[in-house]
Image: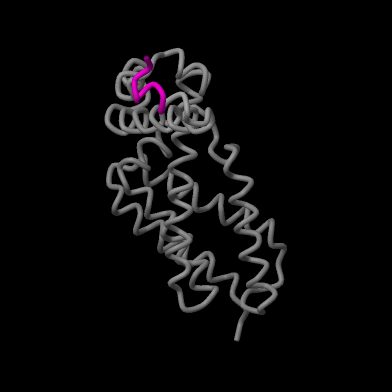
C-alpha cells in the first residue's frame, strides 16, 4: 500500500509541485550566489541545498545562467515591493518619485543586491538596461512622470524620454556604488548629484 506521503504527493496538483521545485532551487541558488558569488557557486551547491537533482535544474532553468536570471528577477520583484511601500509614505507625488529613486540608489549598498544584481549579474548576463525587467520599469517610471506633468508639478517634457534618462542615471549610480572601494561615500555623492539633476524637472514658481 502507498504511504501517506506518497498519496499526498500524488494528490497535489502538478503546477504546485513545479512551483515548489523552482522555489527550492531559486532559494538555494540565491543563498549560494550571495555567499560565494556566481563564479564560485556550483550547480551541486544548488541541487544539494534544494534536495534535488541536476536534471531538475536543467529542466526548469536550462543552466546556471538561467538560474541566476531567475534569482535576479526574484530580488528585483522584492525591491519593487519595497520601493512601492517607500513611495506610498511620501506626502506628495513628487516626493514619492524622488524617494523611490533615491531608495533604489541606496539599495546598492546592501550586500546581496550588490553582489548578485550589480556585480555578478552584469558580468554574466550583460547590460542590465537590456534585462527583461527593464521594460516594466521604464513603463512605471514613464507613468509616474506623466502624472507629475499632468498635475503641473514638472515641466511639460516627453515622459518616456525622461523616464529612460532617470532610470539610466539611477542604474549607473547603483553600478558605480557597487564597484566602489568606499561604497558609502560614493552613495552619498551619487544621491546628492541625482537630487540636483532631477530638481531641474520642477516647474518654476
Q: Which residue lies furthest to the bottom in this view?
A: 205
Q: In percent of the image, x 51 and y 78: which residue is there? A: 92
Corner quadrant of residue 180: top left
- Toward the viewer: 5 or 162? 5
Corner quadrant of residue 57: top left
- Toward the viewer: 64 or 120? 64
- Toward the viewer: 98 or 61? 61
Seen in the picture, residue 28 relative to 3 is either above or below; the reply is: below
x then y, percent, for residue 10: 46, 24
Quarter of the image with the N terminus is top left
Seen in the picture, residue 156 relative to 193 is either above or below; the reply is: below
x then y, percent, for residue 16: 49, 33
Q: In percent of the image, x 71 and y 67: which residue is there? A: 157
In the rendered view, does 80 fall on the left or right side of 130? left
Q: In percent of the image, x 65 and y 54: which residue is there? A: 139
Q: Give the range drawn in magenta.
A: 1-8
Amino acid at each position: 500500500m502507498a504511504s501517506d506521503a506518497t498519496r499526498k504527493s500524488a494528490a497535489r496538483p502538478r503546477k504546485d509541485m513545479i512551483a515548489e521545485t523552482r522555489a527550492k532551487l531559486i532559494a538555494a541558488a540565491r543563498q549560494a550566489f550571495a555567499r560565494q558569488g556566481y563564479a564560485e557557486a556550483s550547480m551541486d551547491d544548488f541541487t544539494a541545498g534544494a534536495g534535488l537533482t541536476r536534471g531538475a535544474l536543467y529542466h526548469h532553468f536550462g543552466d546556471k545562467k538561467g538560474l541566476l536570471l531567475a534569482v535576479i528577477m526574484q530580488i528585483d520583484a522584492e525591491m519593487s515591493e519595497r520601493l512601492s511601500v517607500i513611495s506610498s509614505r511620501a506626502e506628495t507625488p513628487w516626493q514619492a518619485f524622488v524617494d523611490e529613486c533615491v531608495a533604489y540608489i541606496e539599495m546598492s549598498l546592501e550586500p546581496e543586491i550588490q553582489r548578485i544584481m550589480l556585480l555578478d549579474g552584469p558580468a554574466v548576463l550583460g547590460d542590465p538596461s537590456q534585462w527583461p525587467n527593464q521594460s516594466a520599469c521604464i513603463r512605471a517610471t514613464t507613468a509616474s512622470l506623466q502624472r507629475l506633468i499632468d498635475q503641473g508639478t514638472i515641466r511639460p517634457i516627453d515622459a518616456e524620454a525622461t523616464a529612460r534618462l532617470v532610470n539610466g542615471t539611477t542604474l549607473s549610480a547603483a553600478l558605480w556604488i557597487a564597484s566602489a572601494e568606499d561604497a558609502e561615500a560614493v552613495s552619498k555623492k551619487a544621491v546628492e548629484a541625482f537630487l540636483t539633476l532631477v530638481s531641474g524637472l520642477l516647474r518654476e514658481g
